[in-house]
Amino acid sequence: MTTTNTKLDALRAEIDRLDAELLSVLEKRVAIVEDIAAAKKDDGKALAFRPGREASILRNILKRHSSKLPDTVIAAIWRELISAVGGMQRPYTVSITAPDKSVGYWDLARFHFGSATPMKLHQLPTVVLREVSENPATLGVLPWLSRERDTWWEHLAQGGDNIPKILAALPFLDNPSGEFEDLNSLVIGQAEPEPSGDDVTLMVVVTRNELSRARLNEQLGKAGLKGFCSDSRSPHAEDSDWLHLIEMPEFVAKTDPRLVELGKVVGDGFIKIVILGAYAVPMS
């Protein structure tokens, strides 16, 4: 046997040893997740989807990652692992809206939720909204292509116990191949959004009368909020209210005192504020 073959055999043996070590560590991680699932068995929550924590984990992994593997490969490995163990705690399904480019939307969701998560494809966002509203173990993926054309957020603005919240944005990691170009989506579900450390909060300000975006932006500043109005919808009927979609570059909880202050600043025409949810800022 040549020296080269001896060296190759030794390297391959080391790879085999590392594979066994990786599998052992993976099995230990899964065992811990099983203990967590047992501890959560009676807490009443329907979803194990933790988008804020998942984003934080992935950011830390990619920050520490120093090999020659592309970030997308590292992200894909951890997304598969995170989604699979989340499904072990409490199984969930994903309903995807794909009005066009359905293959792209499917791939986008599959990359994030992993190969083991059951998924369904629908053409209409109303179908996805209904499935998520009726089943707390279902997550929905809705297009966020053009704020001017999107209307599904008006349904979320109704608020209420069974109305889903925005929980995440896809893709979380930009794909350099451009596979997911112009297919930005938001994930909704019957859960409360959680901070990841770098977030965007979406909310709706409901008013009786029309209010210009510039005026509303000024009022947001007076209330101490950094957000801006990205869309306003006129009432569908004479006795309906105006809906103003606000985007804020921070995590804002529904108990934030600045929301009360905003209501005071808006004045007589103010009706209410509905937090639609929040999402971790995607990585580039």
Image (cartoon, rainbow, N blue to C red):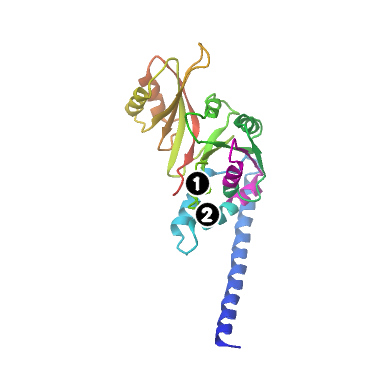
Q: Position of residue 148 (x, y in %)?
A: 47, 29
Give yes or no for residue 193 being in the magenta stretch: no
Q: Which mark is residue 217?
A: none
Give yes or no for residue 87 being in the magenta stretch: yes
Q: Disc 1 and disc 2: Cα gap in Å?
A: 9 Å
Depth order, front residue of 45/139: 139
Q: Position of residue 26 (x, y in %)?
A: 60, 60
Residue 242 seen from this side = yes
* Residue kind at label 1, given as amino acid type: Phe
Q: Earlier in the sequence, mark 1 or mark 2?
A: 2
Mark 1 touches mark 2? (CB < 8 Å):
yes
The local crowd at label 2, few if under 14, some if 14 to 19, many if 20 or more residues have their Cα within 10 Å, is: some
Q: Position of residue 116 (x, y in %)?
A: 66, 50
* Residue kind at label 2, given as amino acid type: Ala
Q: Which residue is mark 2?
A: 75
Residue drawn at 52 percent across, 54 percent down: 75
Q: Is residue 82 left or right of residue 261?
A: right
Quadrant of the image occupied by residue 257: top left
Q: Label 2: state its secondary structure.
A: helix
Residue drawn at 61 percent across, 55 percent down: 32
Residue drawn at 33 percent across, 29 percent down: 221
Against 62, is 68 above or below?
Answer: below
The span picked out in magenta is 82-109
Against 199, is 57 above or below?
Answer: below
Q: Which residue is mark 1?
A: 172
